[in-house]
Image: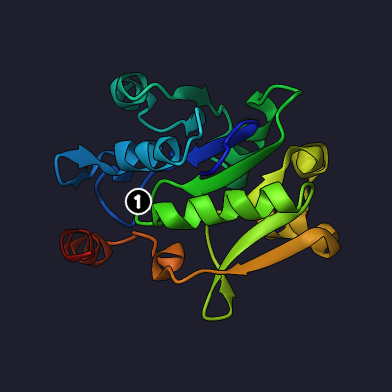
Amino acid sequence: MNRGDGISAIILAAGFSSRMGRFKPLLPLGETSLLAHVIQLFQDAGIENVRVIIGHRHTALMPAIERHGATPVFNPDYRKDMFTSVVAGFASLEPEAEAAFILPVDIPLVRLATIRRLIETYDSNRGKIVYPVYKGRRGHPPLIPFALSESIMKWSGQEGLRGALKPFEARAMQVEIPDEYIHFDVDTPEDYARLVLEWKTG
């Protein structure tokens, strides 16, 4: 049974969805939406502190966020890039926070077993960055110690979160996960069609 205490989830949902042509967080997935599905994923793993970083069309997201008991965090810099939402997420956490998952809302099919496995790994390796890996390639969501948040928030270099975490590679752990969905993001209408099919059959 996973713990979840002290571990938060930061869901990135502030972007424009420009390549999709529709607002990705509110795309239907069964009887719910991508955003609601991702919130529920973390809650089912025992994580009570779920933060949703909002920006574009933020008022449209509030009903789903409130209905599912998550916490909205407005990113005033959302027009710049996704990394500003990562920064806003870490800035919103309490000082006693221990670690946080980072997951873009358009990577919604990550399996519950994956989240649980990452939590269990972190519990045995406190202070480590825990990356899920499928077929040798890192995916989402990484689980990042809050102790690194100050360095992340000060980062002004290239590659966003990936670049901010490079100096801490010695503290990184990779966990091989039988979950291809850690790599599956929804950017285009074709991706969304595949997402719905995968969700129905998976």
Res 127 visible: yes
Q: Nearer the viewer, residue 126 or 36?
A: 126
At x 15% / y 46%, what residue is drawn? 30
Q: Nearer the viewer, residue 174 or 119?
A: 119
Taking 52 as reference, is 3 left or right?
right
At x 36% / y 25%, what residue is drawn? 65
Q: Residue furthest front?
A: 1
The residue beneath circle 1 is 18
Mark 1 crowdedness (10 Å alpha carbons): few <14, some 14-19, many ≥20: few
Taking 144 as reference, is 178 left or right?
left
Residue 158: x %, y % from top left: 72, 59
Figure label count: 1
Residue 56: x %, y % from top left: 40, 33
Residue type at the position of mark 1: Ser
Q: Is residue 174 above or below residue 62?
A: below
Taking 168 as reference, is 145 left or right?
left
Residue 85, by quadrant, is top right
Q: Is residue 175 above or below residue 147?
A: below
Residue 48: x %, y % from top left: 50, 27
At x 38% / y 26%, what residue is drawn? 58
- SS type, badge 1: loop
Res 81 visible: no
Residue 104: x %, y % from top left: 47, 48
Q: Is residue 186 above or below residue 126?
A: below
Q: Nearer the viewer, residue 41 or 18?
A: 41
| Placement of the C terminus among the 4 image quadrants | bottom left
The colour scheme used to paint the residues is: rainbow
At x 67% / y 57%, what residue is drawn? 130
